[in-house]
Image: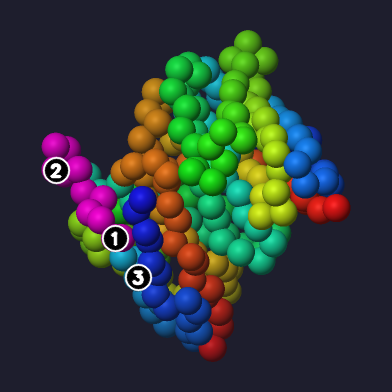
């Protein structure tokens, strides 16, 4: 199975500052046949289901603010929030969909400093 | 608008069974792969099962293989999860989730989720 490891487990950032969350896969999630990375990022706020933010590692879902961006390839990925807003406090998860089981990272809790 | 509404959760004793349902609306249900994802209290997300758009392909988390069965009724726009031989470690909120692309089964991600239904396995 693909093991997804996020770092850090928690992160405190000031309003307006940059937040960076890392995700490392135990195996490459890049399909060389189509050059796509089978990786998504989700945001989950308390008491709510997850919300898709990024897919194919770097494509923003419709309606997601452009302060959210995804990067990386192969086994190492990053979610960046360029300027933290109040509504961004949440837990963030990466997920690979290269192979079943479609494993998630353990989550990164983003808080205000 | 897309809606996914889970039902069927509750408190059940270890070893017993439960069937979850997910009623879908607002999209062409028969065209999309569907998933069940669970979240134990205070823990992270765990993918449980996938069924292809036509029900022809099914995949499971190893720890639920042989105990859980995912199915769908495209005439009723409903997804199911039959859970047998339940264990304490199956206690979680169970979400149904929709694949983002039609006829996929390989992503790219889950673009709509239900609000979840809580399953508690306890004697």
Element type where label 1 sits in the image: loop
Residue located 63% across and 44% down the image: B95
Whether residue A82 can be seen here? no
The span shown in magenta is: A25-35
The residue sitting at the top extreme is B75
Give the side of residue A84 with respect to residue B36, left or right. left
Q: Mostly what secondary structure, the magenta segment?
A: loop
* Residue that mark 3 sits on: A22
* Residue that mark 1 sits on: A26
User: Residue B93 placed where, x, y %?
Assistant: 69, 50
Residue located 71% across and 43% down the image: B86
User: Residue B26 placed where, x, y %?
Assistant: 61, 26
* Residue that mark 2 sits on: A32
The one nearer the camera, A112 or A57, is: A57
Element type where label 3 sits in the image: strand
Badge 1 density bin: few <14, some 14–19, many ≥20, Cα 10 Å: few
Give the side of residue A33 with respect to residue B52, left or right. left
Residue B75 drawn above or below residue B88: above
A31 in the magenta segment: yes
Label 1: chain? A
Label 3: chain? A
Quadrant of the image containing the N terminus of chain B: top right
């Amino acid at each position: 199975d693909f093991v997804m490891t996020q770092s850090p487990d928690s992160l405190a950032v000031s309003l307006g500052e940059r937040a960076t969350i890392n995700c490392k896969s135990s195996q490459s999630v890049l399909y060389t046949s189509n050059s796509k990375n089978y990786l998504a990022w989700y945001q989950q706020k308390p008491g709510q289901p997850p919300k898709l933010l990024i897919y194919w590692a770097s494509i923003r879902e419709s309606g997601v603010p452009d302060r959210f961006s995804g990067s990386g390839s192969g086994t190492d990925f990053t979610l960046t929030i360029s300027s933290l807003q109040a509504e961004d406090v949440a837990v963030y998860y990466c997920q690979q969909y290269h192979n079943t089981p479609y494993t998630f990272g353990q989550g990164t809790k983003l808080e205000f400093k | 608008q897309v809606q996914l509404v889970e039902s069927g959760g509750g408190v059940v004793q270890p070893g017993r069974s439960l069937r979850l349902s997910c009623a879908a609306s607002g999209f062409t249900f028969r065209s999309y792969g569907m998933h069940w994802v669970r979240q134990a209290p205070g823990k992270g997300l765990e993918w449980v099962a996938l069924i292809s758009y036509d029900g022809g392909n099914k995949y499971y988390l190893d720890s639920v293989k042989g105990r859980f069965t995912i199915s769908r009724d495209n005439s009723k726009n409903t997804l199911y999860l039959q859970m047998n031989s339940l264990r304490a470690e199956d206690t979680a909120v169970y979400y149904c989730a929709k694949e983002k692309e039609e006829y996929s089964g390989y992503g790219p991600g889950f673009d709509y989720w239900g609000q979840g239904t809580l399953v508690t396995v306890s004697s």
